[in-house]
Amino acid sequence: MKTEIRKDLVEEGVEMLYKEFGPAKTIKFFQIVGVHRGDTLKEIEGITEKLSREEALALVKKAI
């Protein structure tokens, strides 16, 4: 799969998760399936709870 197509697919998937779950549940989902960078859930929730949707999505995308 081309990198650009894969990136678009990942971005679309993250946006769908965020829309359905919100930021905290999206992050919990990634932790369950093994996508994480070492931050604890409490740290991530503390960071994302005051962020806009776009800012939270940028953080999730950065973690992937």
Image (cartoon, helix red, strand yellow):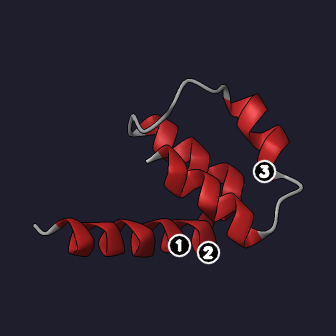
Q: Is label 2 or label 1 in front?
A: 1
Numbered mark located on residue 19 in the image: 2
Q: Are marks 2 and 1 in contact (CB under 8 Å)?
A: yes
Q: Label 2 is placed on what type of residue?
A: Lys
Residue 53 image point, x, y percent? 73, 70
Q: Is residue 39 left or right of residue 35?
A: right
Q: Nearer the viewer, residue 13 or 32?
A: 13
Instruction: Estimate the spatial distance between the alpha carbons at disc 1 and disc 3, rounded to whole Å.
Output: 15 Å
Res 7 → quadrant: bottom left
Instruction: Estimate the spatial distance between the alpha carbons at disc 2 and disc 1, rounded to whole Å.
Output: 6 Å
- Residue behind mark 3: 48
Q: Which quarter shows the N terminus?
A: bottom left
Q: Nearer the viewer, residue 2 or 34?
A: 2
Secondary element at image label 2: helix
Q: Earlier in the sequence, mark 2 or mark 3?
A: 2
* Circle 2 crowding by C-alpha within 10 Å: few under 14, some 14–19, many from 20: few
Instruction: Estimate the spatial distance between the alpha carbons at disc 2 and disc 3, rounded to whole Å.
Output: 14 Å
